[in-house]
Image (spheres, grey):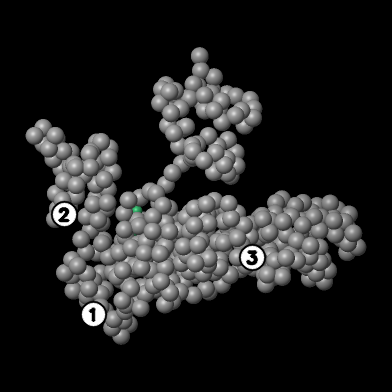
Amino acid sequence: MKNKIIEGFSRLGKIDKIKWLVNNYTDNSEEVQNILTQYWNEDAALQKLHEEFSENTISNFYMPYGIAPNFLINNEVFAIPMAIEESSVVAAASKSAKFWLDKGGFKTSILGASKLGHVHFIFKGNPEKLKSWFALYLQEELYKQTKDITRNMVLRGGGINAIELIDKTSELECYYQIQASFDTRDSMGANFINSCLEQFSQTLKYEIQKAESFTEDEKNSMQIIMSILSNYTPDCLARAEISCKIEDLIDESGISPQEFAWKFKQAVEIAEIEPYRATTHNKGIMNGVDSVVIATGNDFRAVEACVHTYASRSGKYRSLTHCEIDNGIFKFWLDLPLSLGVVGGLTKLHPLVIASLQILNKPSAEKLMQIVAVAGLAQNFAALRSLVTTGIQKGHMKMHLLNILNQHAATEEEKNYFVNFFKDKTVSHHVVISELEKLRNK
Ligand code: MEV
């Protein structure tokens, strides 16, 4: 009888965790145990390092770590590290990098670098009294009482930019926020922001009890609900842009540059008005974005959450990229809200993150934001370029060929045969299978 519930799992050693798991949750315990232990690193110290990143670690989950070379960004060349399992992403990024290399490359800028956080609270008293108390007294007190937390960040040129009281009572009864904006310099800043916010909530709770302008009922009606950063950072924004003369848009499919530019712009405009397409369009952008975010040890869930809120900011989910054709010039750009760090978190701990940041020439957080935005724009350019010319499957299936062959335990000789076989044909699953059968029956 299997026992699927356990007390004290986290206190078991790694091998006991695995034994309990495979015995109670799998019907081939030996196979699963072998897989899990096979992925342990031989270097025990390195293995332990990874285990300590997270609770209940029993193995490691590998992802391909690739490089997209030849990215010219603001006249500096980068080889961009990307951690991604989807076979065509690094190839697509590299193809775009090469395409734009002799056309001036990518131009980037930072449009903003501030992040927000909130103390969410309920107050059932007089709103005007709350507002004047905040303006005349509390606001300054919030700055004062976070001095110890903000000291080092201020020395690095960051800190708290602004603190406001926001009345949200028209949307939810008695609901207010203390909203603060922060500059967290080279760190993503989640711990810094949350520490400031938790201090704000303590100051608010303590100071209202001392305030003479409120009645006892008003004081007691104030309830802090929660204090937390917002992952929506529309003012922490990077722009990446490419542009060239229309006649320079030469594609190997043979389409004329004029038709290519027109179809490409149409494709972007469709994604600007049609959420079904915008979702897939933006997913392609995030193929590039997430893979660099992961390779540099940043929080891709935060980035994903933020980006999709940003894409919906008009009330409708839209394309993150935009295209313009003006006076014979084709221009394509992406504004991407990104909260990234190059210090703190995993940045000095995960060896591959250390390697990625070295490969990128130790960027500041703002520079990394720009590199990530370029990866997103390059990815979208590659996707739309294929979609409006040959279609996406040609490139996708070419890259997927090795996955299909590996699923059928193809030898190196068979793999070489198929790469050659599909040189001038579109790869399809059933052709691979039938050809493989023929080959093996020979
Ligand atoms: C596949 O991962 C991404 C694409 O579907 C993006 C797009 O359609 O723009 C190719």
Instruction: Determine the secondary structure under disc 1.
Output: helix
User: Counting residues from the N terminus, which is met first, the one under dot 2 or under dot 1?
Assistant: 1
Image position of 146 (left or right of 259): right
Q: Is residue 164 visible?
A: no
User: Badges 2 and 1: C-beta atoms under 8 Å apart?
Assistant: no
Q: Circle 3 sits on which residue? A: 184
Instruction: Determine the secondary structure under disc 2.
Output: loop
Q: Residue flagged by tag 1: what amino acid is it?
A: Glu
Q: Circle 2 sits on which residue? A: 423
Looking at the rendering, which quadrant does residue 274 occupy?
A: bottom left
The quarter of the picture showing ligand 1: bottom left
User: Counting residues from the N terminus, which is met first, the one under dot 3 or under dot 1?
Assistant: 3
User: Counting residues from the N terminus, which is met first, the one under dot 3 or under dot 2?
Assistant: 3
**Residue 208 place in picture, x, y as percent:** 84, 59
Q: Residue flagged by tag 2: what amino acid is it?
A: Lys
Looking at the rendered image, the quarter that the C terminus falls into is top left
Q: Circle 1 sits on which residue? A: 247
Which residue occupies the foreground of this view, 222 or 44?
44
Residue extending furthest top?
1
Q: Residue flagged by tag 3: what amino acid is it?
A: Thr
Which residue occupies the foreground of this view, 94 or 312?
94
Residue at image location 23% in from the left, 38% down from the top: 410
Looking at the rendering, which quadrant does residue 57 occupy?
A: top right
Residue at image location 72% in from the left, 56% down from the top: 195
Which residue occupies the foreground of this view, 334 or 153?
153
Residue extending furthest front?
43
- Per the model, the C-alpha gap separating discs 2 and 1 is 29 Å
**Residue 25 place in picture, x, y as percent:** 48, 24
Relative to 64, residue 277 above or below:
below
Number of numbered markers:
3
Badge 3 density bin: few <14, some 14–19, many ≥20, Cα 10 Å: many
